[in-house]
Amino acid sequence: MRLLSLRAAIEQYVPDGCCAALEGFTHLIPFAAGHEIIRQQKRRLHLVRMTPDLIYDQMIGMGCASRLTFSWGGNPGVGSLHRLRDAVEQAWPAPLALDEHTHAGMAVAYTAGAARLPFGVLRGYLGSDLPTVNPRIRSITCPYSGEVLATVPAINPDVTILHAQRADREGNVAIEGIVGAQREAALAAKALVVTVEEIVERFPPMMNSVLLPHWVVSAIVQAPRGAWPAYAQGFYARDNAFYRQWDLISRDREVFLAWMREHVLARQAA
């Protein structure tokens, strides 16, 4: 494990053309890391995320992505992701290929990746029309029962990036609150970068937390408020007003670009 600046971590672990998963479910979304990816003008990324929201809207709108593997994309509680829609419908600023799944399919794919299996198995897709638009969803016959089951290819990102409340000096990471696919995405990746609110000598007592041991962590970055405008349980609340504002900011290309220049490109990461 290495303690790095955000600039150095993104420069080292997110090369052009790589597969990158920025995970976090409703909170602990790694916005600061996504903004640094934008500032470094990373290109042709295959972005992976369960429920892509504003940070992927921003990264896609700034030309970072060429492919998106996802389940449900939108501005939570508000509406569409306009930059994502523009990329898919109008190829602006670049064409975007889609690999769409359900939440369950993404979870199974990450779990298979974490186990270093080639694919995951589930019942959820059978009888739906999603396999007709995603040829990567296939099926097998169970050798024990004869039941036909759906399969999804394992997800093994080149790098997974998470945000968490704390890391200790050895590089162990503690995640409190709602946990989506963070653990599975971390264990499935070739490299794991974690931005944290604080680095501590020892963890306080925590209930229902997830601990990622230092030997699976490639780099730790101290990035206070690194999940804003999402929330970090125990540190700050979700900025609901910003999520509503983003709907207006992101609708128009020029308004979007002006906002990104002022609030992302003009700011430097530590």
Image (cartoon, rainbow, N blue to C red):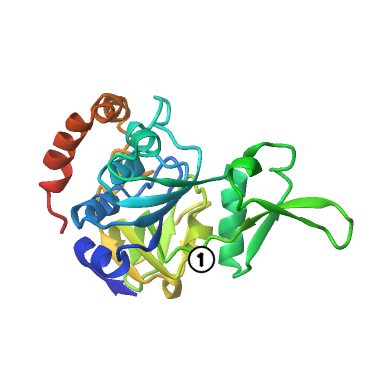
Q: Nearer the viewer, residue 4 or 207?
A: 4
Quadrant for the N terminus, please: bottom left
Q: Nearer the viewer, residue 67 or 28?
A: 67
Q: Residue at x 50, y 37 (%)?
A: 72
Residue 89 picture location, percent across and down: 39, 34
Q: Is residue 22 visible?
A: no
Tell me if 183 is positioned left or right of 245 in this view: right
Q: Residue at x 46, y 44 (%)?
A: 25
Q: Nearer the viewer, residue 213 or 184?
A: 184
Residue 244 picture location, percent across and down: 31, 25
206 is higher (above) or lower (below) than 75: below
Tell me if 188 is positioned left or right of 23 in this view: right
Q: Is residue 82 visible?
A: yes
Q: Nearer the viewer, residue 49 or 83?
A: 83
Q: Residue furthest right?
A: 145
Report the amino acid beneath label 1: Leu
Tell me if 125 is positioned left or right of 73 in this view: right
Q: Residue at x 18, y 29 (%)?
A: 255
Tell me if 43 is positioned left or right of 212 in this view: left
Quadrant for the C terminus, please: bottom left
- The image quarter containing residue 218 is bottom left
**CA neighbours of label 1 inside 10 A, class few (<14), some (14 to 19), many (20+):** many
Q: Residue at x 57, y 43 (%)?
A: 103
- Give the labeled residue for mark 1: 187
Residue 171 picture location, percent across and down: 36, 70
